[in-house]
Image: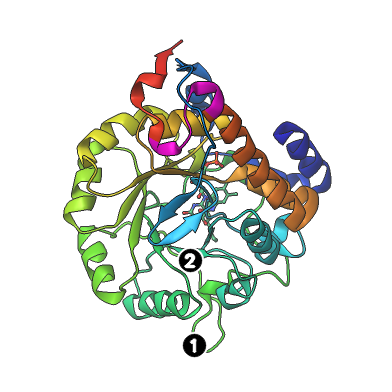
Amino acid sequence: MLTELAARARARLDPAHWDFFAGGAGDERTLRANEEAFQRLRLLPRVLRATGPRDLRTTLFGTELSAPLLVAPTAFHRLAHPDGELATARGAAAAGTVLVVSMAATTPVEDIAAAGGPLWFQLYPQPDLEFTAAVVRRAERAGCRALVVTVDSPVFGRRERDRRNGFTDLPAGLVCEHLRDGTGRVRDIVMDADLGWERIDWLRGVTGLPIVLKGLLHPADALLAVEHGVSAVLVSNHGGRQLDGAVATVDALPAVVKAVGGQVPVLLDGGIRCGADILAALALGAGAVLVGRPVLWGLAAAGADGVRQVLDLLREDLDRALALAGARRPADLTGDLVAARC
Ligand SMILES: Cc1cc2nc3c(=O)[nH]c(=O)nc-3n(C[C@H](O)[C@H](O)[C@H](O)COP(=O)(O)O)c2cc1C
Ligand SMILES: CCCCCCC(=O)C(=O)O
């Protein structure tokens, strides 16, 4: 079903835009590794113990989600569908989950908020602190419930497909709406190589929103993140779009979970394509997962309905996988259910 939606998306999209969404950095080793790592896992289900109704609901920062599944921040939704991020927000709301709005969204967060579903906001901290603080205040005023700070992008990953296609700019009429300054001018986004831990401390002073640090893979960084007072860490390699050769996220997860030791939730994204992938991530200690590309395929194929279809499908597939593994709730999932890697 997801494969079919991806094919429909591909048929609808300009090939250069398909490549932007589907592609990764370098030789795309990490892009492939994310999915392959899940495919290598084998589950060891329990039987005769998960009687009674199942319940996938999960609460994060006071927001109840229909399942431990959120929409990862991705750029430029109006390249995928004319309704862009509005459609994504409607689909996510209908599926009962959070959309993480990208700093590189092509729709203003105030308009996205009108869809009514819960939102978090993803930030690329900019060297201009005043501008960064203004973007954070915008997200707060629009009702975003958490700030996801992306820290895996001191420089932009080398995207060979985009270079080949000459894809450097958005088409006329589309801009990154959160890069407008007070005068209406749209700034260039800066991937800031000077971003350090002191900026996370500074951000904690700027906002009372929970901060989720996105783009960690090393357990030592996860521990530092906790020491710097973040509210959650998101194990991510940016869907294989930054450091090609970086470890697959599900392979990095257990050491991060161990280092964090339950002090804050550990989230994961990268390569989630079915319920068994979500189940494995939860069993290995993730509190919830985020999906990027599958949502883009739903959006490109069928707008808000397509986004909802993808999220419903993943939730239903997780529900089935839970039953088959002998669990009723995400909290029942434990590491012993992941038997081996082949
Ligand atoms: C087309 C595209 C655009 C993305 N844009 C952003 C972004 O603006 N900010 C960000 O933090 N991550 C961005 N990401 C990374 C995603 O948030 C997420 O880490 C990744 O897509 C997860 O992998 P998956 O696509 O295999 O689910 C983007 C990913 C894709 C595929
Ligand atoms: C010029 C805007 C750059 C947006 C970056 C989006 C992103 O994170 C990605 O992976 O692509």
What residue occupies the far front of the structure in this picture?
52
Q: Residues within 10 Å of mark 2 (few under 14, many from 20)?
A: some
Q: Is residue 116 above or below residue 285?
A: below
Label drawn at residue 182 = 1
The image shows a total of numbered marks equal to: 2
> Picture coordinates of residue 59 (x, y %)?
42, 54
Query: Label 2 belongs to which residue?
Result: 189
Q: Is residue 338 above or below residue 268?
A: above
Establish whether ligand 2 lies closer than 8 Å to the Cβ of label 2. yes
Whether residues under marks 1 and 2 lie with C-beta atoms below 8 angstroms apart, the answer is no
Q: Amino acid at mark 2?
A: Ile
Q: Amino acid at mark 1?
A: Gly
> Picture coordinates of residue 340 (x, y %)?
41, 13
* The quadrant where residue 46 appears: top left
In the rendered structure, the answer to whether residue 323 lies left or right of residue 337 reads right
Q: Can residue 179 be seen in this snapshot?
A: yes
Q: Which residues are the magenta region? A: 323-331
* The quadrant where residue 122 appears: bottom left
Query: Helix, strand, or loop for circle 2?
Result: loop
Q: Residues within 10 Å of mark 1 (few under 14, many from 20)?
A: few
Q: Residue at x 28, y 69 (%)?
A: 203
> Picture coordinates of residue 115 (x, y %)?
65, 70
